[in-house]
Image (spheres, helix red, strand yellow):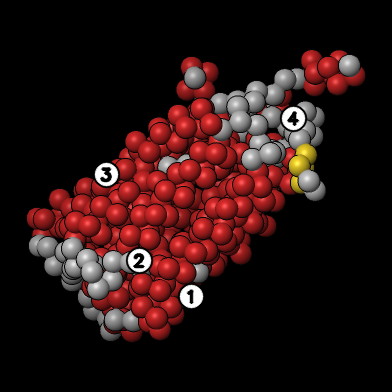
Amino acid sequence: MGNELRNPNIILYLIGTFFSSAGWSVWGYSLLSNVIYLITTSSLKVGYAEGIQGVISSVLAIPFGILADKWCRHGVGKIGLIVGIISSAGLIAVLFIGMVITKDELYWILFGSLALYGVSTGVESSALATMFTNSVPTGSRSAWLSYLQICSALGTCCGPAVAAIILKTLGDIWTLHDMILPWTVALSMQILSCFIYFPMHDKWCLADESMGNITLKRPNKQWKCLHTRHIPYLCTVLDCVFGLASGMSSKFFPLFFEYEVGYSPLELQLLFVGSFGMIVPFTFVAKRVADKLGRVQALLLLLYLGLTFLLVIVVGKGHYWDNKWIIGIAYVFRAGLMNSPTALHRSIVDDYVDSDKRGCWNSLEFVFVLGWSGSAMLGGLLVESVGYQYTFLITLVMQFVSISLYWLLIPLVERKEYILEEINEIEPLLVN
């Protein structure tokens, strides 16, 4: 662990992720849907505006991921970060402009700002993530990705906590005027994170023998028609289905809590503090379970448990949707369980992908992770046509199907996270 702590890429990415997560958890998750709804009173328009950033990010992520592998990751990352600073500053200005223009004009300015933000995310996300993973030696990847996830979870707790203090001071009601200050503070954190990421550089990435190049060495396994080389492809399909399912619901939970359950702005921020905070202990649990049972086994266990709490929310309509405690507790545990093993999933993909191709594969991961923003368009249509209950039910079924694909990985992925040896050390063993 000591050597990794001396690597600037690792330290910068961990700190930047904390501030980025703190900002996004407020403006991008808890406030954005409600701000758009206050402007338009239309769930469908919420879906369009929320979805545009995911669609643009998805379109740009793969070509810029390939460009990062072929050219230089720090160069691509800096381009995205500059656009990120500009788009975040533009989003701050949006609500101030909204005081002097019509709501229809405000909606389209916000729509354009979110599109520009999608450009920045699509360009820089995979480049920065790849510089981080290529700075971590193979055998330690799941541990450091778990630390990264904890930094993200702590940030997503601190952001809503700060917003809760602001809302308590200003007034606990849903108005555009009261959203300005927490919105501005959150996006300022996003800008700060861009400056923290900026010095990251390829020169601090490790050599192939340390970070793992599977064209040189790998533990080969085969089951039926599947081989270890198929692991990244299976994970990609899983991400695709899971991301689409999440996007139908995730962007609409804030509206659900406000209009169906009756949460005030302050109560909503406190709920997100609890839900994001629950990710931290469950991340430690996920790592311990993975050490005992294996990474894939831990993913299956925790994700299936997380789905049971979404089921509690789905079946609650007409019974306890007006009970803030039951719905809130179910949501908190669902968030903790569903998000805690993310680091294990990413570590599996990175362990079975060549180090010089991780930019492309990380961009594929981000396409489907960000795809849940794109599928918010479908979510908005579903919420308006069939309501929250059936929208959440569709999400549950699709997530169950995607999680079940992990069963195919059990025969292929080592239970114990392996440490790759240099090729000249393992060749005699292959001859024997």
Question: Between disc 2 and disc 3, whose residue precedes?
Answer: 3
Distance from the alpha carbon under mark 2 to that under mark 4: 42 Å
- How packed mark 2 is, by other alpha carbons closer than 10 Å (few <14, some 14-19, many 20 or more), is some
Q: Position of residue 167 (x, y in %)?
A: 15, 57
Based on the displayed image, in which of its 4 quarters is residue 317 positioned? bottom left
The residue singled out by tag 4 in the image is 219
Q: Where is residue 392 in the image (x, y as percent from the top left)?
A: 40, 67
Residue at figure coordinates x 66%, y 36% from the top left: 413
Specify the amino acid type for callout 4. Pro
The residue singled out by tag 3 in the image is 158
Question: Between disc 3 and disc 1, whose residue precedes?
Answer: 3
The residue singled out by tag 2 in the image is 314
Specify the amino acid type for callout 2. Val
Looking at the rendered image, the disc whose residue lies closer to the viewer, 3 or 4, is 4
Near-viewer residue (223 or 72): 223
Looking at the rendered image, the disc whose residue lies closer to the viewer, 2 or 3, is 2
Mark 4 lies on a secondary structure that is loop
Residue at figure coordinates x 32%, y 73% from the top left: 36
Question: Between disc 2 and disc 4, whose residue precedes?
Answer: 4
Distance from the alpha carbon under mark 3 to that under mark 1: 31 Å
The residue singled out by tag 1 in the image is 378
Residue at figure coordinates x 48%, y 43% from the top left: 301
Q: Does residue 412 lie above or below 324 as drawn?
A: above
